[in-house]
Image (tube, helix red, strand yellow):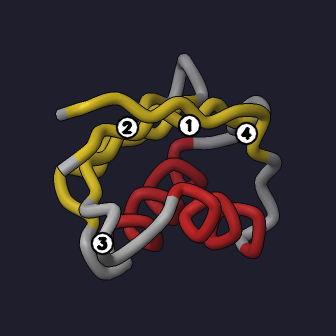
Amino acid sequence: MKKMIMQLDTLACPSCMQKIEHAVSQQPGVSNTKVLFNASKIKANFDPEEVHPEQLAAVVEKLGYEVQSTKVKEA
């Protein structure tokens, strides 16, 4: 497992946070998804054998949110 921290453009409302958290957490190989509303960040653990950060960024962007950067660390 690896840990991803994705920086987003500013989130407009708490419902945005819930929509993103749900969509990312439904992806294969993703666990412990948390969206930090005030920091506009997504934190999640993921299995690099099942999903890549670029795929998760695409999920977020498909919802209409801009991903500014993504960092990956060992979990």
Q: CA distance from mark 3 to mark 1?
A: 19 Å
In the image, residue 40 lies at what x, y percent? Answer: 60, 28
Secondary structure, mark 3, is: loop
Residue at the location (32% across, 77% down)?
A: 50
> Badge 1: few (under 14), some or many (20 or more) residues near its Cα, within 10 Å?
many
Q: Are marks 1 and 2 in contact (CB under 8 Å)?
A: yes
Which residue has dot 2 on it? Answer: 43
**Quarter occupied by residue 68:** top right
Type of amino acid under label 4: Ala
Residue at the location (26% across, 44% down)?
A: 2
Q: CA distance from mark 2 to mark 4?
A: 18 Å
Q: CA distance from mark 1 to mark 2?
A: 7 Å
Q: CA distance from mark 2 to mark 3?
A: 18 Å
Counting residues from the start of the chain, the first of labels 3 and 4 encountered is 4
Which residue has dot 4 on it? Answer: 12
For the C terminus, which image quadrant?
top left
Q: CA distance from mark 4 to mark 1?
A: 17 Å
Q: Viewer-proximal residue, 47 or 64?
A: 47
Q: CA distance from mark 3 to mark 4?
A: 33 Å
